[in-house]
Image (spheres, rainbow, N blue to C red):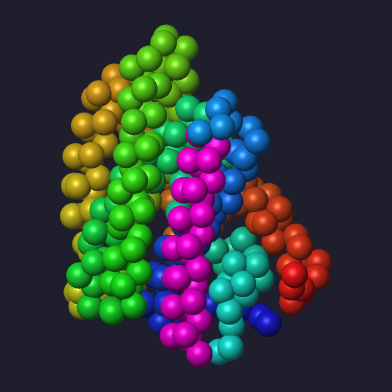
Amino acid sequence: MTVHPTDDPITTVALRQADRTVVLAQRLVSWITHTHELEEEIALANIGVDLLGQARALYSAVAEREGTGLTEDDYAYHRDDWQFRNPLLVEQANGDFAHTMVRQFLHDAYATELWNGLLTSTDERLAAIAGKAVKETAYHLRHSGTWVVRLGDGTPESHDRAQDALDRLWRFTGELFESDDVVAGLVATGVVPDPEDLRRRWDATVDRVLGQATLVPPADVVMATGGWSGHHGEALSRLLGEMQVLQRTHPGASW
């Protein structure tokens, strides 16, 4: 079934957040059998499962709102890369463990504030999804933040790897707090929190943890943008190729 773009603001925002979570989940599950210890492998798998659960809830909400007969699988598996609306941060390749943890922390600091803001959304479905997601994301942030401090304030090599990851990933953080006509309209009606408020809270968390980690964000960075509106890099195309191959090869297959 073909998935067409939507003009509904709430659907657009829900898709953006669903795509954010499903893409990052796919990145995290790539670590299974590749981490340095079994405990961490289980932790990353569990975080990935949480994110998939959030994606499923959001895709299902979109499907019900649209009423076109689409399912969560249609949104996840039968859209091309240009139809995805995730921020560029989450599609960046895993790199080494420090790179993954810094990416996760920058994301989790955002997701925590987003879900907290959505708890009081005037859209009852988004508020209900936030009620569960906020608890999960609080753990995600503790986990990634602890690792960033451990790596940044650890050995010279772990510090250098974490700092290099921060230098590479920082340019993808500005996009998280961008506004457009869709967001501005939903802020005015109380559906989503104000991105400027999210940014202030994110800044406070990031500054605190990076200070403990002895890591310093790069200065004078030109921020990358485009993910929220469907402009992505080759990394997402490859990720979706792996994630969608079974459904694309055998449409409608079931176990």
Q: Quadrant of residue 179?
A: bottom left
Q: Is residue 184 visible?
A: no
Depth check: give the residue in front, 13 or 185: 13
Residue 66 vs residue 241: left or right?
left
Q: Residue furthest right?
A: 249
Residue 161 vs residue 125: left or right?
right
Residue 178 lies, in percent from the top left, at 32, 56
Seen at 49% across and 72% down, the residue is 59
Seen at 80% across and 70% down, the residue is 250
Residue 166 lies, in percent from the top left, at 40, 29
> Is residue 174 depicted above or below 186 in this figure?
above
- Secondary structure mostly seen in magenta is helix
> Is residue 223 depicted above or below 240 in this figure?
above
> Is residue 209 depicted above or below 118 in this figure?
above
Q: Which residues are magenta?
A: 40-67
Residue 43 located within the stretch drawn in magenta:
yes
Depth check: give the residue in front, 227 or 58: 58
Residue 108 vs residue 78: left or right?
left
| Quadrant location, the C terminus | bottom right
